[in-house]
Image: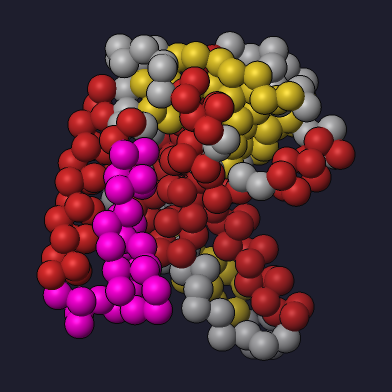
């Protein structure tokens, strides 16, 4: 997600974006960033400092990482409860896999290989997971922002995920049946143009994409063309009240 903060263009991304190369590339472009941190992968020194963050709801603490970057860590009791529940479920799955090694067909978070085939409980990962319950980290070079501003900007990532869902389902971005590059690009351009329009409509009407499409789908446009003169006459099927308010926003002359 790209946002504008105090005149700076800033990139907000989840932890999948975190890598030294990606952050350096963003900095070369003079871009600010806020990315999710993988706390368990940080150095032992930083890790020991992180787990000392007060375990009180909404507590935050900032750590200097060097290279004009900072790590902001926040604690949430709600997140701690979820993390604990997830850890206990993962431990049950790991124990089941240990007791039934023949059914293991994928990697388990709390298991590690010993030798070529044997598995054992990864107690180090279990301990790390328990120590990090409720903690969430954010790496940023936007040092002028407060901890709460950083967390708030990152929390808007769900809007990006929502846009992807709308594009793929409601606007049918895929499957793409074209093979020519120009047609593929045209298809995606139409989808993303429609996405921009539908998100604007959502913000304006406070209705969801599904509700907007539900109201507009019954509205059909009839076009009649004179084959001799090529003159066209178009009329819309009389819309219901719910669709009328939406059509007014588009300034389409739907009156029959």
- Against 16, residue 203 (above or below) is above
Q: Is residue 51 left or right of residue 193?
A: left
Closest to the observer: 166 or 131? 131
Residue found 19% across the figure and 67% down from its top: 98
Q: Quadrant of the C terminus?
A: bottom left
User: Residue 78: horizontal and vertical position, in percent?
Assistant: 24, 27
- Against 117, residue 70 (above or below) is above
State yes or no: residue 157 in magenta: no
User: Residue 59: horizontal and vertical position, in percent?
Assistant: 39, 12
State yes or no: residue 120 in magenta: yes
Whether residue 182 is visible, yes or no, is yes
Residue found 63% across the figure and 85% down from its top: 178
So how many labels did they put on this image?
A: 0
- Against 227, residue 200 (above or below) is above
- Against 194, residue 135 (above or below) is above
User: Residue 205: horizontal and vertical position, in percent?
Assistant: 41, 34
Seen as rendered, the residue at the extreme front is 115
How is colour applied across the structure in the image?
secondary structure
Closest to the observer: 151 or 95? 95
User: Residue 115: horizontal and vertical position, in percent?
Assistant: 39, 74
Q: Quadrant of the N terminus?
A: top right
Q: Is residue 247 left or right of residue 69?
A: left
Residue found 52% across the figure and 42% down from its top: 41
Stretch of the chain drawn in magenta: 100-128
Q: Is residue 124 left or right of residue 178?
A: left
Residue found 29% across the figure and 68% down from its top: 119
């Amino acid at each position: 997600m790209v946002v504008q903060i105090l005149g700076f263009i800033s990139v907000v991304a989840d932890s999948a974006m975190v890598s030294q190369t990606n952050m350096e590339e963003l900095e070369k472009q003079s871009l600010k960033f806020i990315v999710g941190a993988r706390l368990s992968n940080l150095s032992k020194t930083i890790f020991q400092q992180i787990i000392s963050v007060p375990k009180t709801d909404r507590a935050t603490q900032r750590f200097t990482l060097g290279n004009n970057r900072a790590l902001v860590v926040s604690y949430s009791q709600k997140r701690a409860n979820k993390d604990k529940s997830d850890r206990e479920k993962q431990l049950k799955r790991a124990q089941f896999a240990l007791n039934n090694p023949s059914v293991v067909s994928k990697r388990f978070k709390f298991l590690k290989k010993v030798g070529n085939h044997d598995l054992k409980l990864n107690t180090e990962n279990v301990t790390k997971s328990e120590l990090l319950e409720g903690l969430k980290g954010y790496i940023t070079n936007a040092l002028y922002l407060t901890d709460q501003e950083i967390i708030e900007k990152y929390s808007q990532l769900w809007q990006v995920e929502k846009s992807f869902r709308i594009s793929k389902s409601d606007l049918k971005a895929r499957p793409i049946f074209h093979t020519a590059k120009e047609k593929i690009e045209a298809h995606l351009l139409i989808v993303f143009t429609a996405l921009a329009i539908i998100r604007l409509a959502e913000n304006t009407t406070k209705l969801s994409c599904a509700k907007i499409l539900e109201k507009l789908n019954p509205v059909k446009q009839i076009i009649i063309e004179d084959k001799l003169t090529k003159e066209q006459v178009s009329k819309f099927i009389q819309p219901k009240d719910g669709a009328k308010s939406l059509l007014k926003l588009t300034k389409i002359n739907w009156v029959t």
